[in-house]
Amino acid sequence: MNYWAALSDRQRDVAQRPITALFDAESRAKAFSVTLETPATGPVLFDYSKTNLDTETRDLLLDLARSCDVEGRRDAMFAGEKINETEDRAVLHTALRNLEGSVAVDGVDVMPEVRATLARMETFARDLRDGRIRGVGGRITDVVNIGIGGSDLGPAMAARALATYADGPRCHYVSNVDGAHIHDTLEALNPETTLVIVASKTFTTIETMTNAQTAKAWMSRAVAEPTRQFVALSTALDKTSAFGIDPARVFGFADWVGGRYSMWGPIGLSLMIAIGPEDFRAFLAGAAAMDQHFRDAPLVDNMPVMLAMVGVWHRQICGYGARAVLPYDQRLARLPAYLQQLEMESNGKSVAMDGSALTTAAGPIVFGEPGTNGQHAFYQLIHQGTDVVPCEFLLAGQGQEPAMAHQHRLLAANCLAQAEALMRGRSLDEARALMKAKGLKGKELERQALHRVFPGNRPSTLLLYPRLTPAMLGAIVALYEHRVFVEGVVLGINSFDQWGVELGKELAVQLLPMIDGTASAEGRDGSTAALVATLRELGI
Ligand code: F6P
């Protein structure tokens, strides 16, 4: 059976059906949600009842997942098979958080090395936090993580999310090659009591290596042997040595950890320093609990699978081009940025694993902001614009500021209100009644009413969790990782390479001498050549 065609037919059949009508069945809220309760996380609810999915559609979506062998590919990933075929690599970020047992790559059990590196990280983090590892000026007060993409977004997002758990040195994150970023960060710091972490899987990324050199020069003004206050997180141990970093201060990892999946291991060192090894272990345990659920639960009760298949329904079947991630949790402010890399670098592809052109749309555009801020920015388009944007809300049962529980209740009311408004909308008659109550009449009443109509029937999901703890954050991130994986399998693509970032990097290397004025821009396209000339006139 062609499930794609069957789902398209189904979509045509139900497109005009109001989601609200589906709630005539009393049990819908329960039947169209997934609950997961683990000791690490407590009860977590993924509610997708405010979508146009019904039992028949869900069955088709799950048949599609089965026909793509989601379960087989999942098991292959966890078993260390080389499912990243274009880079000939295993995909084993899950091994960084499932610390018991063994898993082999090329016939070698990788777990002893994983555990040994984690133990080294913990010793280092403890020594730093307790003041046994010091700078020339005494106790380390500040840590600067220099990295970009997966070597920045994960730990930066998590450090912010877990700010209430941070009781170690202050952690700062520098990523952009724009000198303003590192300037503004270092300006406030004392090099004598600062530790710099250079986080780069390849140790070649131009932004990171440029910022690392800048940091080294800054450090050398006050510290005779600057690299003694440097740490490297990388797979390229030859390059970290060439930079001058003591191998004892290098935390390596294997090529089967993808950049955007790497914060569970050495790339998470800054987070471990901030929150401490125990809370970092809890973070890993939360992710491991989600892994276990993903491996064990039947597809219909499987949170990552259902999150993914709702995504497939909206993007590939309904044709909605974007997806909004809306955490009603201020400390998850960087989650949308983190998910932009996770989702768009993983599933923003046009060819299937075998190189053939995709016959369906690839992954959606992902964007978002914490609620309630987004409400006062882009929700206008989500409610009344011409595009339907499925929304993924996230909300905690309890806020992180117990003294301000009333503010958390207001936050929660806003979150539920937005989802309800998206689904229900406001009809023209309701809008007319409102205008009438305001005293408007005739043509003006009609004109004003039309502006106040909300089409409604706009889908959203909610992830409702008890509280944003380290374990909960780990589970949330693992949930999204597996969602991306499932969507990738259903699309038939390789979610673990990122060839699309290469061309721009290559051209930047070619353009730099032209912008420097040491090479001619002749032969470039007319636009680029003219812009190089203008930049030179501007005195770049
Ligand atoms: O932007 C491409 C990319 O390769 C990402 O996938 C990666 O997370 C980032 O660059 C940083 O790479 P590295 O850790 O090697 O510096």
Image (cartoon, rainbow, N blue to C red):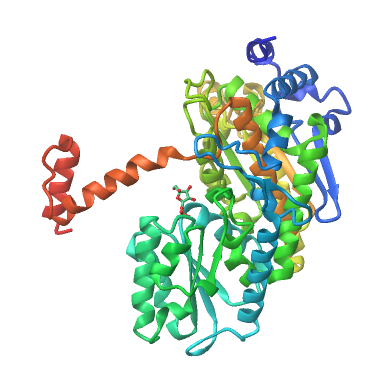
In front: 271, or 415? 271
Looking at the image, the residue that sits furthest to the bottom is 137
Q: What percent of the width, then of the height, locates residue 484?
A: 62, 37
Q: Is residue 502 left or right of residue 77?
A: left
Tell me: residue 165, above or below residue 487. Answer: below
Pick the front one: 413 or 271: 271
Q: Which residue is drawn at the image coordinates 33% and 42% (left, top)?
A: 504
Instruction: Pick whichever, 258 or 159, lies toward us.
Output: 258
- Number of dots carrying numbers: 0
Question: The C terminus is located in which quarter?
Answer: bottom left
Q: Residue at x 45, y 55 (%)?
A: 202
Q: Residue furthest front?
A: 107
Q: Position of residue 489 (x, y in %)?
A: 63, 29
Q: Quadrant of residue 140?
A: bottom right
Seen in the image, is 99 located left or right of residue 329?
Answer: right
Q: Is residue 159 visible?
A: yes
Image quadrant of residue 440?
Answer: top right
Compared with residue 22, is residue 299 higher up or lower down, i.e. above or below? below
Vertical position of residue 188 compared to residue 253: above or below: below
Residue drawn at x 44%, y 66% is: 240
Foreground residue among 296 and 364: 296
Q: Is residue 468 visible?
A: no
